[in-house]
Image: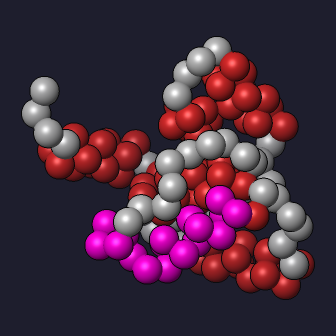
């Protein structure tokens, strides 16, 4: 469940005319903070980002549709599709606890400064040159 302040900031971004991706950035930031605080771990920066985007979709942020075939793993596409459809209906207690337990087993280094820097550089390399 995202924090109230995060949802409010994201809504304010949308009202200000900023892009949905910018608004979703608040959720990603929150997720990275959670990993750093030790609430749970993330195997890689991509995983932390994916969790944040999923929360944004469930909060009703109008993000782009899930990635097309070949762009992401099948499970990622399916998860994004469900998150976009769901709109925060309560997850069963069993599933929620299982997810959290699995995330707690992950390392905390996924949201470290160096890991995020590495991720940003690799993504920038993949983008077209200006």
Choose top left, top right, bottom left or bottom right for residue 72: bottom left
Task: Tell me if I can see residue 30 in this picture.
Answer: no
Which quadrant is home to the N terminus? bottom right
Relative horizontal placement of residue 83, taking residue 2 as reference (left or right): left
Q: Does 31 appear above or below 43?
A: above
Q: Residue furthest left?
A: 129
Q: Does 91 appear above or below 17?
A: below
Residue at image coords 78%, 81%: 95
- Please say whether residue 78 is one of the residues in the magenta stretch: yes
Residue at image coords 10%, 33%: 129
In the foreground, 70 or 49: 70
- Please say whether residue 101 is one of the residues in the magenta stretch: no
Residue at image coords 64%, 23%: 13
Relative horizontal placement of residue 110, taking residue 14 as reference (left or right): left
Q: State the count of labels.
A: 0
Relative horizontal placement of residue 77, taking residue 130 as reference (left or right): right
- Range covered by the magenta-colored residues: 69-85
Which quadrant is home to the C terminus? top left
In the foreground, 40 or 85: 85
Choose top left, top right, bottom left or bottom right for residue 51: bottom right
* Colouring style: secondary structure
Name the spot of residue 91 as percent of width and height, x first: 84, 72
Name the spot of residue 42 as percent of width and height, x first: 52, 64
Choose top left, top right, bottom left or bottom right for residue 58: bottom right
In the foreground, 73 or 120: 73
């Amino acid at each position: 469940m995202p924090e109230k302040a995060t949802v409010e900031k994201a809504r304010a971004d949308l009202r200000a005319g900023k892009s949905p991706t910018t608004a979703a950035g608040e959720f990603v930031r929150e997720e990275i903070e959670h990993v750093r605080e030790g609430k749970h771990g993330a195997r890689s920066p991509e995983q932390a980002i994916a969790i944040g985007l999923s929360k944004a979709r469930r909060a009703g942020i109008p993000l782009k549709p899930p990635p097309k075939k070949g762009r992401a793993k099948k499970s990622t596409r399916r998860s994004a599709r469900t998150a976009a459809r769901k709109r925060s209906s309560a997850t069963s207690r069993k599933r929620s606890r299982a997810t959290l337990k699995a995330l707690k087993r992950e390392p905390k280094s996924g949201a470290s400064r160096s890991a995020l820097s590495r991720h940003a550089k690799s993504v920038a390399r993949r983008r077209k040159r200006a």
